[in-house]
Amino acid sequence: MDPYFYTEKPKYRPHDIEDASEFYDIIERSSLTHQLSDSRPYIYWTMEIYDKANGIKGGGGLGVLAADTRRVAEKLDVPFVVVTPFYRSESHQKITNLEQEEFSETVSPQDYGFEYIDDVSVSSRGFPDASLSIFKKALGSTQFVTISEPNFGQLYEGEGSGDHRLYQEVALGFGGYKALKLLGIKPAVIQLNETATIFAALARLDELCANGMNLYEAIVYVRKHTLYTNHTLLQAAEPEFHRSQFEKLVLPNLKSNAVRCWLMEQFRNDRLRPNLLAIELTEAKNGVSKLHARVANFRDRNNDKVKFHAITNGIDLETWVLPEIMQLYSESGIIDKFGLPTDNFHAKIDTLTASDLRAMHRAGRAALNRVLEHRKDQYNHPVQIPENALLFDFKRRFANYKRPYMPFTNPKALRQILVDYNAHYILAGKVHQGDTVMYQRLLEILQLVDADPILKERVHYIQDYDEELGRALAVGSNIAINVPEVGWEACGTSWEKDIANLKLLISTSDGGVADIKPIACLEVSGKNYDEEVRSLYLNIHKAARIMQNDSLLEKLTHRQLKAYLPIISGARMMKDYLHFLFPKR
């Protein structure tokens, strides 16, 4: 783990918050002091969390969001418990002969300060009960409650609709619920971070019915105390399981015959998508951006379209933003002590000068180069980016819909840009295991770069993308490229980290960027892919010229920050969730 990212003492020191009641008062929810407590906290169930400082390395954006949500809760002193697996195997990437390879490292909860509590078990037909070790770790007002066992498998191991995936989900839901009971924790509310966590709600329903509550009364109770946060645009993209898989892995964990019968009634043609259970067992449902909530195509049992409330993802500013910039925001009166934009933040943003911006860029470049000293490019060499060089970056999961290959569509045009503006380009992101199409795409990009002397000198693919590298690039490059195919990105948060770090953003109008219409950055648009590519190159030229001009740099940076700071704020995200879950009476 990198000492800079995790242990360097920041110059920025946030104002102390005496207790959560201060935040509750600010957001007009003073009653939460009685509704949330250590014994009845906000419970956040997630199949992954990406918090390497605490030893848990998730699979990507969903896990990063989960980690940020907990960090924000801790800073605001909100009683908050994350229930998640602790995977004993951590995946990594390396490049050999320009091709991606994966390898794993073993990790242990005890190595990161987790306390062993006890074992619980989950059952399956025809097999001995699986024993799950429960570990916890307290961090201020928040804590991790994790389940773990040596053969649990890596996150997303196996087929999406395979037995191992269903076992992971059942173990987290039923095992995690037993863990809370073991610790004497009663949920005030449960947030299900994506469909894979639905078995937590099913476990709660089963306990209520097994203790004598009428099935339909129990369903109403679970619905009123459970939020389903969806990150998927299409219901058809969700996994689907066969009745026989549920009979083997789910039914043995149910005590109530009424719940067992109700569950089997949910199947159609012997198949069931767990998202239908999530729709049935939750009253509150949200998408993670305005666009996502509007276009997500999910239907309930009656084939009626499901309505999702929009709560756009935010970030923990202190984790992702350069300390010097956080200090500038605080001293300039742009953000308050909770991490929320101040009432007059627009006017305060206007006081940021080009000199301020360039000083922050220099500090960010130095921070990036400290990280790059111990990272490797596609040739297994460390990289250093000159302070006076312009730096573009693409940093996110190497998925087809995110289109990391777009800037390389016209190598001649890219080469000319890099030469004309004394620029470098950093590409970072892993191909998801088993995605053979994108394995090939990455290889083709690296081969193209390798065959061109100028691109080979100025285009750097940094291996083993993780939160350390993501943060370093967020603070240390000048211009971010975010070009998902419109309609495919639920939200994304990399672009938020870029804008918060005073970078210029080039983006399509997708995900959370599209919360603002028209989008408040340099927009890539077009009726087809070729038009979008031309638009991208025009915007790359435009961004490079803006970086050379103080007046233009101030104007675009101010515009981006004014539009998106309220969206970016993780405290705003927490406020929105608390407003949604605890309506004002």
Image: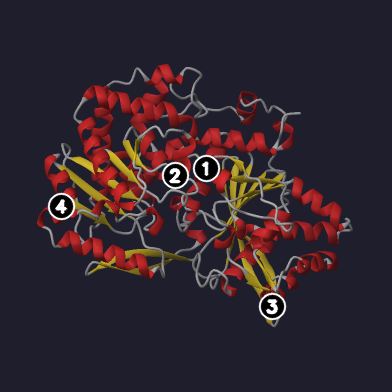
The mark closer to the camera, 1 or 3, is 1
Residue 509 at x, y = what percent?
A: 42, 41
Is 288 on the left or on the right of 227, as rendered? Answer: left
Name the quadrant containing residue 261.
bottom right
x 28%, y 39%: residue: 479
For marks 3 and 2, give the CA distance: 39 Å
For marks 2 and 1, give the CA distance: 7 Å
* Mark drawn on residue 291: 1
Residue contact between numbered discs 3 and 2, judged by CB atoms under 8 Å: no
Tag 1: Cα neighbours inside 10 Å, few (<14), some, or many (≥20)?
many
For marks 1 and 4, give the CA distance: 35 Å
Q: Amino acid at mark 1?
A: Leu
Tell which circle, 3 or 2, labels the residue nearer the N-terminal end.
3
Q: Does residue 534 appear in the picture of this structure?
A: yes
* Mark drawn on residue 412: 4
* Mark drawn on residue 510: 2
For marks 3 and 4, give the CA distance: 56 Å
For marks 1 and 3, give the CA distance: 37 Å
Tag 4: Cα neighbours inside 10 Å, few (<14), some, or many (≥20)?
few
Q: Amino acid at mark 4?
A: Lys
| Residue ID for mark 3 | 244
Q: Secondary structure at mark 1?
A: helix
Q: Secondary structure at mark 4?
A: helix
For marks 2 and 4, give the CA distance: 28 Å
Tell which circle, 1 or 3, labels the residue nearer the N-terminal end.
3
Quadrant for the C terminus, please: top right
Residue that extends furthest to the front in the rendered view of this protein: 527
Residue contact between numbered discs 2 and 1, judged by CB atoms under 8 Å: yes
Q: Amino acid at mark 2?
A: Asp
Residue 521 at x, y = what percent?
A: 36, 34
Residue 314 at x, y = what percent?
A: 50, 39
